[in-house]
Amino acid sequence: MKTHRWEDVRHKRTPEREAAVERLRDEMVEQVTLRQLRDLLGLTQVELAARMEASQAQLSAIENRDDRLVSTMRKYVEALGGKLRLQAVFEGGKVLEISE
């Protein structure tokens, strides 16, 4: 395997490479499940359910459901301490932020 010095490759940022990095980032983000997100933040279902004012069983159902309401996702993310952002991405790279 040929190696390259950092000085030789660091300025070779092209639109194609930037797009490939963006696609990889998007793929990585899409692969995180709600449970994995909760686990990464070190919370149990019981702890997060208390923050959401829900039962552990309700939280389990949310995490295992295939289809969720945006309002449910917002409540879940906010209980984790985050803010939910919804984007629509179209061909040509046009991104629209969807807000209430």
Image: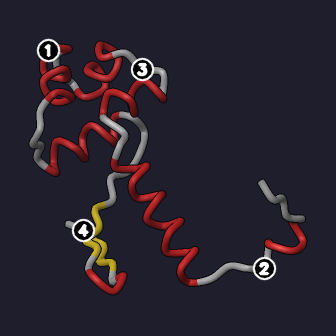
Disc 4: which residue: 99
SS at badge 4: loop
Q: Amino acid at mark 3?
A: Leu
SS at badge 3: loop
Work out whether residue 62 or residue 100 is closer to the camera in this orientation and state it. Answer: 62
The residue shown at (42%, 20%) is 43
**Is tag 3's residue or tag 4's residue first in the polypeptide sequence?**
3
Q: Residues within 10 Å of mark 4 (few under 14, many from 20)?
A: few
The residue shown at (80%, 72%) is 9
Q: Amino acid at mark 2?
A: His
**Residue 37 place in picture, x, y as percent:** 40, 33
**Residue 19 place in picture, x, y as percent:** 49, 74
Q: Which mark is residue 67?
A: none
What is the quadrant of residue 13 in the picture? bottom right
Q: Which mark is residue 11?
A: 2
Work out whether residue 43 or residue 28 is closer to the camera in this orientation and state it. Answer: 28
**Is tag 3's residue or tag 1's residue first in the polypeptide sequence?**
3
Q: Tell me how far mark 1 sits from mark 4, CA to CA.
A: 29 Å
Disc 1: which residue: 57
Q: Tell me how far mark 1 sits from mark 2, CA to CA.
A: 52 Å
Name of the residue lying farthest toward the front = 1
Q: Quadrant of the C terminus?
A: bottom left
**Is tag 1's residue or tag 4's residue first in the polypeptide sequence?**
1
**Residue 71 place in picture, x, y as percent:** 15, 48
Q: Residues within 10 Å of mark 1 (few under 14, many from 20)?
A: few
**Is tag 4's residue or tag 2's residue first in the polypeptide sequence?**
2
SS at badge 2: loop
Q: Amino acid at mark 1?
A: Ala
Q: Nearer the viewer, mark 1 or mark 4?
A: 1
Is 1 located above or below residue 61 in the figure? below
Q: Tell me how far mark 3 sits from mark 2, CA to CA.
A: 41 Å
Q: Tell me how far mark 4 sits from mark 2, CA to CA.
A: 37 Å
